[in-house]
Image (cartoon, rainbow, N blue to C red):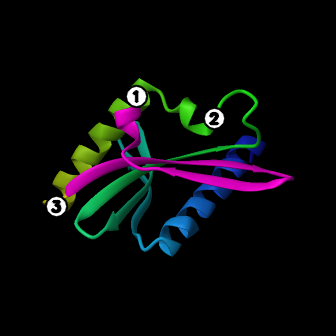
Amino acid sequence: MAEHNALGKKGEKLATDFLIKKGYDILEKNYRYLKSEVDIIARKTDTVIAIEVKTRSTPEFGNPQDFVKPKQIQSLVKAMDHYVVEQDLDVEIRFDIIAIIKNKLGTKIEHLENAFYHF
């Protein structure tokens, strides 16, 4: 497995553990619809949250969350629309980013709620 793929999988595991500790229920991991993938779908109270996990080993080229681009956001929205219909849910939907920097110095996790409103 390529090093960046391994780092991404570690990041998704860290994000899942982080969310569980914060009281979220994990509904799906790596949910796919057409060419889209939602890293984590979680639920907290009456809200279903699509979480994009971005993991980097350094902030040298920008913060992890800066790598979520408008086309990817559109793709995530379509996937979540499909998920809600497929599961016959009547809930609020929120889009979050969990940005992780993991390197020899340690791990920094930042949870950006309603992240797409910042774009």
Taken as a whole, is the magenta stretch helix, strand or loop? Answer: strand
Question: From what the image shows, is residue 72 above or below residue 111?
Answer: above
Disc 1 crowd rating (10 Å Cα; few below 14, some 14-19, many 20+) is few
Decide which of tag 1 and tag 2 comes sooner along the chain.
2
Which residue is denoted by mark 2 in the rendering? Answer: 63
- Tell me how far mark 3 sits from mark 2, CA to CA: 33 Å
The amino acid beneath tag 2 is Asn
Q: CA distance from mark 1 to mark 2?
A: 14 Å
Measure the C-alpha gap from mark 3 to mark 1: 27 Å
Q: Position of residue 41 (x, y in %)?
A: 38, 58
Q: Is residue 116 magenta?
A: yes
What amino acid is labelled 1 in the image? Phe
Per the image, label 2 sits on a secondary structure element best described as loop
**SS class of the residue under badge 3?**
loop
Question: Where residue 20 sits: x, y (%)?
Answer: 49, 72
> What residue is shown with label 1?
119
Residue 89: give its label: 3
Residue 93, label in figure: none
Per the rendered image, the range of residues in magenta is 92-119
Q: Earlier in the sequence, mark 3 or mark 1?
A: 3
